[in-house]
Image: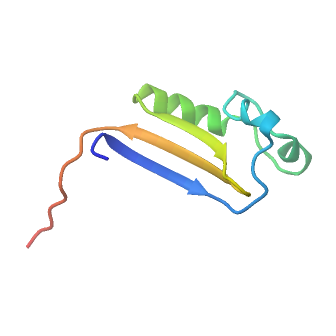
């Protein structure tokens, strides 16, 4: 949109638990399902949020209507038209 880079990823899963949604980006937070069967420290999304905040950007998650989750990032920056070598 001329103000920076916006990237979103949408899945077709069951979506995010609304109770856990507000904690996804907290340090060391691991959702109920992740605690039961996967490895990790719960730092990935927190680190992502910190790095983007340092650059003036942001990251967020939301549930899609019907089903699925959407994770989005925005990184501000000047844009310029792409030029291809001849």
Identity of the residue furthest to the bottom in this view: 86
For the point 52% across and 52% down, the residue is: 8
For the point 63% across and 42% down, the residue is: 61
19 or 77: nearer the eye?
Answer: 19
Identity of the residue furthest to the left in this view: 86
Image location (x, y in percent) of residue 41: 75, 37
Image location (x, y in percent) of residue 32: 87, 41
The image quarter containing residue 48 is top right
Identity of the residue furthest to the front in this view: 65
Image location (x, y in percent) of residue 44: 64, 39
Identity of the residue furthest to the right in this view: 36
> Is 3 positioned to the left or the right of 49 in the image?
left
23 or 48: nearer the eye?
Answer: 23
For the point 71% across and 35% down, the residue is: 24
> Is 36 positioned to the left or the right of 8 in the image?
right
For the point 40% across and 39% down, the residue is: 75
> Is 24 positioned to the left or the right of 84 in the image?
right
Relative height, residue 40 to residue 56 (above, below): below
> Is 60 positioned to the left or the right of 53 in the image?
right
On-image quarter of the C terminus: bottom left
Image location (x, y in percent) of residue 5: 37, 46
Please, which colouring scheme is shown? rainbow
């Amino acid at each position: 949109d001329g103000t920076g880079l916006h990237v979103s990823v949408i899945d077709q899963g069951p979506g995010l638990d609304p109770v856990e949604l507000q904690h996804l980006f907290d340090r060391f937070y691991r959702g109920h399902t992740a605690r039961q069967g996967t490895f990790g420290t719960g730092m990935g999304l927190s680190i992502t949020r910190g790095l983007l905040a340092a650059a003036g950007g942001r990251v967020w998650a939301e549930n899609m209507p019907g089903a699925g989750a959407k994770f989005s990032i925005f990184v501000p920056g000047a844009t310029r038209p792409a030029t291809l070598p001849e």
